[in-house]
Image: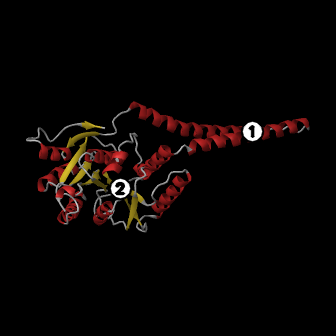
Amino acid sequence: MSDKKLPRLTLVVPCFNEEAVLPSSAQTLDAILTQLMTEQQVTADSKILFVDDGSHDKTWDLIRQLQTTSDHFTGLQFSRNFGQEAALMAGLQTAAPYSDLTITIDADLQDNPFLIPNMVQQAADGFDVVYGVRNDRSSDTWFKRTTAERFYWLMNKLGVHLIPNHADFRLLSHRALSALLEYHENDPFLRGIVPQLGFASTKLYYKRRPRLAGQSKYSLKKMLKLALDGIFSFSIAPIRAVLWAGAAICVGAIAMFIWIVSQHLRGAVVTGWSSIMTSLWFLGGCQLIAISIIGEYVGRTFTQTKRRPRFIIQTDTYSHAFAAATTPAAQSLDHTLSD
């Protein structure tokens, strides 16, 4: 098979304070990519794109060092921390003009990287989206396992169809990626958007590996934000729930009014203010919850209409690698981009 007919692959790897794990992860990914090249599964100019999400340690320095050891390694550096979803979108958007296939995977490689050749083969068989799906959550804590199960159950009830036990380990073909980039949301919930693309997809199952070094960057706060992003980005069910709750409270209030009138006509005067105050506090709490839910949607609309960049790239060595191959001389390694 001629090299021109082979797909060009880019591995997009978001990084945030991954100094401890990056050297071993880079070595593993490089070995896998080299194997794919040797077996003529992908082109010889396929790349590994590390996206430094405003790390505070030596992550970017390590990425620059890796680039001196192999032309497989490239990098993007954010001007500050924008979050993992932004890092994924930045890597995908940067890779889109040059890649036939893109695979996203976390830098800690807990998602089994040795599944990558199988993903490439599935793409060759005609699938535009290949999901890496965990088939075993026994390594998770009881709390994380239980909350994940409840999250998928809740999202399904709200009408949002996710791939259970799938995070951000996936392959996208060029046309699937092009369709994904048509979504211009400020807080894109990729786990919900990708299944909506509608292209031919398949799943590959794996057991998650233990983290080799460093600490998980997904705190309870970040997991809660991710869950809320999924709910508020794909469903108006919370607003409808508030509507029905308000209607039920109104019906109850009418029934209570009728009962109070009947008691008054019978001469049974109800004394005491505790029941009144309890009702006021209860209704006040319901109103605050309702306002908060509606305010969440209004706030997201407000943020979206400002059209601020989702991320700002301080340094891009990925695009330069391809520009250098097609132009006599590259003017600079560093240039600023914004989404």
Q: Tell me where residue 84 appears, x and y as whole percent.
A: 34, 48
Q: Is residue 10 left or right of residue 234?
A: left
Seen from this angle, which residue lies furthest top? 306
Q: Amino acid at mark 2?
A: Asp
Q: Tell me where residue 335 appears, x and y as whole percent.
A: 19, 38
Please report the residue visible at 25 percent of the width from the left and 40 percent of the height from the top.
Answer: 313
Seen from this angle, which residue lies furthest right? 266
* Image quarter hosting the N terminus: bottom left
Disc ID at residue 253? 1
Quadrant assignment, res 133? bottom left
Query: 63 and 89: which one is in front?
Result: 89
Up/down of 299 relative to 38, above or below: above
Query: 275 and 13: which one is in front?
Result: 13
Please report the residue visible at 52 percent of the width from the left and 36 percent of the height from the top.
Answer: 295
Please report the residue visible at 21 percent of the width from the left and 61 percent of the height from the top.
Answer: 33
Name the residue carrying label 2. 128
Q: Secondary structure at mark 1?
A: helix
Q: Tell me where residue 107 appears, x and y as whole percent.
A: 28, 56
Which is more foreground, mark 1 or mark 2?
Answer: 2
Instruction: Categorize mark 1 by other alpha carbons within 10 Å: few (<14), some (14-19), many (20+).
Output: few
